[in-house]
Amino acid sequence: MQKPALSIVVIFHEMRREAERTLFTLSPAYQRNVGPDDYEVIAIDNGSRKPLDAGFVTGFGRNFRHILFETGSPSPAAAVNRGIDTARGELVAVIVDGARMVSPGLVAATIGAAATRPDPFALTLAWHLGPDVQNVSMLDGYDQDTEDALLASIDWRGAGYALFDIATLAPSSRCGFRGGMPSECSWFAMRRDSYRRLGGFDERFQSPGGGLVNQDFLHRILAAPGIQPIVILGEGSFHQFHGGVATNVPMAEHPMPEFRAEYARIRGREFAPPRLPAPDYFGRIPARARRFLSDGPGRQ
C-alpha cells in the first residue's frame, strides 16, 4: 500500500455534531488538488460517553481511519501521541480540537509548504465561526442553533472559502495573514521524526482540553534548532461552538488561571508566551480571505 504524504490526527470528545462537519472538510470530496492516496485522516475519539463509531468515520473516505481511545482523562495529549504513533505518513498534522472545520486547500497547501524546507513547521491561522470570538458572541445568544442557521446560510460544502465570510479571527491569530505567527496553533504539521524527537505532547498536562499542552509544545518547537516555521496563507481552521472549556465560556470564567497553575507545577516556572520568530509564508490568499490581511508592515 502506498504511504500517504501526510497523516492528519484529529481528536474528538463528545462531538458528534461537530465531527460530521470537520470530517467532511477533511475528505477528498471537499479538499482540492489532492486525492485519497495523498493523505490519511486518523480520527480519534478520546473517551466520549457516546463515542464516534468506525462506520461513521470511514464513511468519509477510504483514507479515513478510526481509533477509539479509551481513557478517563479530559486531556487530549495521550490521544494525540497515539495518533502520531499509528501515522503512516512522514509528515503529520494535528488538530487537537475536533470542532475545527478547515478550508478546502489546506491539505494540498500543507504538503506543498512542507516540501519547501528540510525540517518544516507548517501552521495556519484560526477563526471562530460567528460575528465575534465565541467567548463574547455567546453573551449575545450565539449558540449551536444560531451556528447551524449561520452555516446553512452559505454553501460551505461546495464553496468552502465562504467560511471566511462568517468568521472572526481567534484571539491567538489576531496577527492576520502576513502579520507573523499566531501564538497558538490549531493546525500544525511537521516531520513525524521531529515530533518524536521533541517528545510529542507532554502527557502530564491533564487539564480539560489539555490546558497549555499545545503552547508547551510550541515552546519546544521554537527552541529546537533547524525547525522552520511556515505560515500557510489563505487557509485555516474554523471553530464550531460546542461548549469548549476555553473557547465557549465567558472571559470572566476562563480557566487560564488553572491552566497556568498546572504549567507551573509541570515546568517549575510560570508560563510566558514564547518569543515568536518571523516566519516564512507559503500560498496565496483567495479574495474572500483578503479582509484578514494584517495591518502591519507585511500587508500587501
Image (cartoon, helix red, strand yellow):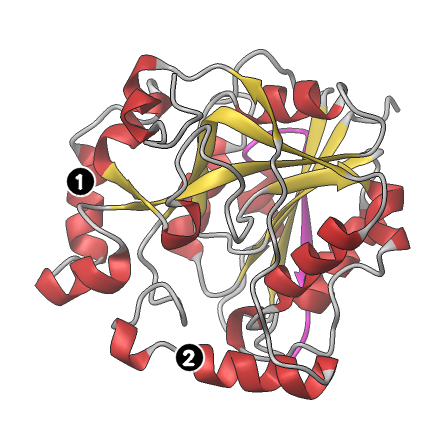
Q: Report, in whole angstroms, how far the alpha carbon at label 2 lies from the one at label 1.
A: 28 Å
Q: Position of residue 3 (x, y in %)?
A: 85, 26
Q: Is 274 placed above or below 154 here? A: below
Q: Give the class, few, some or many, for how many residues have Cα within 10 Å of label 2's Cα (few <14, many ≥20).
A: some
Task: Tell me, yes or no, whether the highlighted magenta stretch contains residue 291.
Answer: no
Disc 1, SS: helix
Q: Position of residue 207 (x, y in %)?
A: 56, 79
In the rendered structure, which segment of residues is drawn in magenta?
59-72
Residue 88 falls left or right of residue 68: right
From the image, state whether disc 2 or disc 1 is nearer to you: 2
Q: Amino acid at mark 2?
A: Pro
Residue 23 falls left or right of residue 227: left
Residue receiving disc 2? 255
What residue lies at 89% left-to-right and 44% top-to-bottom? Answer: 193
Q: Residue furthest left?
A: 140
Residue 269 falls left or right of residue 48: right
Residue 42 falls left or right of residue 237: right
Between 194 and 227, the one nearer to me in the picture = 227
What residue lies at 55% left-to-right and 73% top-to-bottom? Answer: 211
Number of labels in the image equals 2
Task: Tell me, yes or no, whether the highlighted magenta stretch contains residue 65.
Answer: yes
Residue receiving disc 1? 150
What residue lies at 33% left-to-right and 23% top-to-bottom? Answer: 289
Q: Residue furthest front?
A: 297
Q: Is 272 placed above or below 56 here? A: below
Q: Position of residue 256 (x, y in %)?
A: 44, 77
What residue lies at 56% left-to-right and 86% top-to-bottom? Answer: 261
Q: Amino acid at mark 1?
A: Leu
Between 73 and 119, the one nearer to me in the picture = 119
